[in-house]
Amino acid sequence: MKKDIHPEYKPVVFHDVSVDYKVLTKSTMTSSETIEWEDGNSYPLVRVDLSSASHAFYTGKDRQVAEKGGRIEQFRNRYGIETPPEELAAAAEAAAIAAASEAGSGEAETAEAGTDTSES
């Protein structure tokens, strides 16, 4: 092996934030965050969204994306991006229309299309 070209292989704590599971292992990953482990030492902390503690293959539970808010919502939460107000208004309107159509009311669709169904 050539010297000084490989990353340092050292102890790192991986934290699965979806189920609050932490594991100390060795890795070449680096992080500016640190955590004090059970042995009293401080190790770099790498946050992950998925591990063997939360993956459906290992847990036997099928966790759907919709249960966590959808991919766009997950992205916005992960990176601290706020949902624009116009998207919130559009989502609320779409939810109201969907609720009205599920209730068997055709009023929402005709009001949305701008047609008048009343007889003169």
Image (cartoon, rainbow, N blue to C red):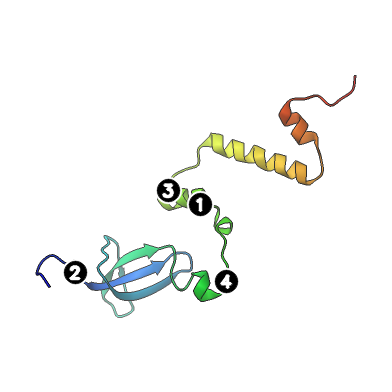
* Amino acid on which disc 3 is placed: Gly
Q: Quadrant of residue 97?
A: top right
Give the residue at the far top of this rendering. Answer: 120
Give the residue at the far right of this rendering. Answer: 120
Q: Where does residue 118 sit, x and y in percent of width and height?
A: 86, 25
* Amino acid on which disc 2 is placed: Glu
Say the numbered circle drawn on residue 80: 3
Disc 2 on helix, strand or loop? loop
Q: Which residue is mark 2?
A: 8
Q: Quadrant of residue 104?
A: top right
Q: Residues within 10 Å of mark 2 (few under 14, many from 20)?
A: few
Disc 1 on helix, strand or loop? helix
Q: Residues within 10 Å of mark 4 (few under 14, many from 20)?
A: few
Q: Are marks 2 and 3 in contact (CB under 8 Å)?
A: no
Say the numbered circle drawn on residue 71: 1
Q: Earlier in the sequence, mark 2 or mark 3?
A: 2
Residue 4 relative to residue 19: left or right: left
Give the residue at the far left of this rendering. Answer: 3
Q: Earlier in the sequence, mark 2 or mark 1?
A: 2
Q: Are marks 1 and 4 in contact (CB under 8 Å)?
A: no
Disc 4 on helix, strand or loop? loop
Marks 1/3: CA distance?
Answer: 14 Å
Q: Earlier in the sequence, mark 1 or mark 4?
A: 4
Residue for point 90% across, 19% down? 120
Q: Residues within 10 Å of mark 3 (few under 14, many from 20)?
A: few
Disc 3 on helix, strand or loop? loop
Say the numbered circle drawn on residue 61: 4
Q: Where does residue 102 sit, x and y in percent of width and height?
A: 77, 46
Residue 90 relative to residue 28: left or right: right
